[in-house]
Image (cartoon, rainbow, N blue to C red):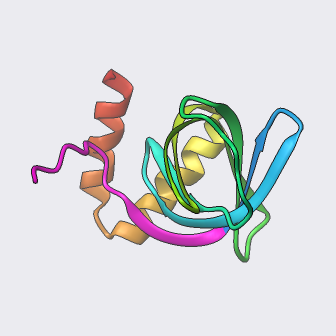
Amino acid sequence: MEEKRRFHRIPFQSECRVSCGERVWIGELLDISLRGVLFRLSKTVLLDKGSLCFVDIALVGADIHLQFESELVHQQGELHGFRFLSENLETLTHLRRLLELNSGEDESTRHEIEVWLEG
C-alpha cells in the first residue's frame, strides 16, 4: 500500500485532554505530526467523524501545553485520530521543536512546515 502522508508521525507519549462542548476525556498521546495526533482514550467516547474538539497536550517535565482546535478524522476502538484545524504561534513553535528533537531530522521538519504553510 502506498503511503499518502505528507507529514511524518513521531511516536510520542504524553497525557492529553480532549474536550468537545461540555464533554472532556483524558487520554494518552501515541503519536503526533505537524497536522494531527493519534490518541488512546480509554473511556467510551461517542463522537462522530467530523466532530470539532479542543485538544490539549501536556508535555512531561515542562509547564508547556500544546493546544489545538481539531477535527475527529478517524476512530477505531480506543484509538482516535484528530486533524489540527488551528493553533496559536506558541503551540506551533513548541510543536516544531518537539518534532525536530524527536525525529532527528531538522531539514525534513523544515520542509514539512513549508508544505504546511503553502497548503
Magenta stretch, residue numbers: 1-14
**Relative to 41, is 11 on the left or the right?**
left
Residue at horizontal 49 percent and vertical 57 percent from the top: 97
Q: In the current view of this chain or complex, which residue is farthest to the top?
A: 118
Q: Quadrant of residue 44?
A: bottom right
Q: Quadrant of residue 116?
A: top left
Q: Quadrant of residue 11?
A: bottom left
Q: In the current view of this chain or complex, which residue is farthest to the right?
A: 22
Could you say which is closer to the camera, residue 79 or residue 98?
Answer: 79
Could you say which is closer to the camera, residue 75 or residue 4?
Answer: 75
Is 3 contained in the magenta span? yes
**Relative to 23, is 80 on the left or the right?**
left
Q: In the current view of this chain or complex, which residue is farthest to the left?
A: 2
Q: Is residue 85 above or below residue 47?
A: above
Is 57 contained in the magenta span? no
Residue 2 pos. (x, y %): 10, 50
Residue 100 pos. (x, y %): 40, 61
Majority secondary structure in the magenta region: loop
Q: Quadrant of the N terminus?
A: bottom left
Could you say which is closer to the camera, residue 21 or residue 7?
Answer: 21
Residue at horizontal 58 percent and vertical 53 percent from the top: 94
Residue at horizontal 83 percent and vertical 32 percent from the top: 21
**Relative to 83, is 90 on the left or the right?**
right
Residue at horizontal 35 percent and vertical 67 percent from the top: 103
Q: How many marks?
A: 0
